[in-house]
Image (tube, helix red, strand yellow):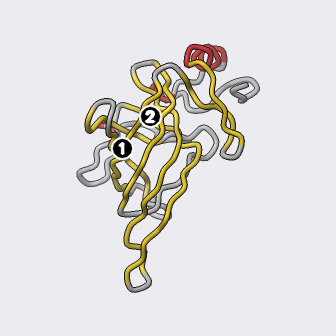
Amino acid sequence: MGFPAATVHAGDKNPADYPLRLHIFNREEHTHYHRGVDDFSVGDGRANLFANGEVHAVDFHFDCSQKIEHSLGYETYLAKWRKPGKSLTVLFPVFGHTGKFFTCDLDTDVKPDIAYFGHRNDLQTEPSAKFKEWMVKHDYDPEHNKNTPTGTGSAE
């Protein structure tokens, strides 16, 4: 799925300002409540970052004002560097509110030579170059709105 064109605006959160794509495979979080209402969520996760035509595995830590969700299928979230290589600002949809977004900064540990593949409970790694070959073969490039791979749809 992902976000279609950069013409969708959400107040001061312009998707055109987020050139990177993040596919979140999994995340573990703890939600803190104040008077019975979600206050913030803290946790860790694993994702692939699509940046400048390359793919890199990323381990991340977050402390967000709202819960974040893993990606469904091949969905990616829009992102940009806050501090290159160290911190990403990610644009997340407000679930249940079409066209509304919130941002969250993720502290990142980028793995330059590997990519993740598989599913939430069966996550594996492979060389980034091999994952990139799969992307080319299946015409999958979330940075250029090619959000659904052709063919088998499997990264294996």
- The amino acid sitting under disc 1 is Asp
In percent of width and height, residue 12 lies at: 23, 51
Q: In which quarter of the image is the C terminus?
A: top right
State the residue at coordinates (37%, 58%).
Answer: 64
Q: How crowded is mark 1: few (under 14 residues within 10 Å), some or many (20 or more)?
A: many
SS for callout 2: strand
- The amino acid sitting under disc 2 is Arg
SS for callout 1: strand
Q: In this view, does 75 lie to the left or right of 39?
A: right
Q: Which mark is residue 107?
A: 1
Task: Give 138 or 123, whichever is nearer the viewer.
Answer: 123
In percent of width and height, residue 9 lies at: 32, 48
In percent of width and height, residue 48 lies at: 52, 33
**Which residue lies most toward the bottom here?**
35
Q: In this view, does 88 lie above or below 69?
A: above
Which residue is tagged 2?
Answer: 21
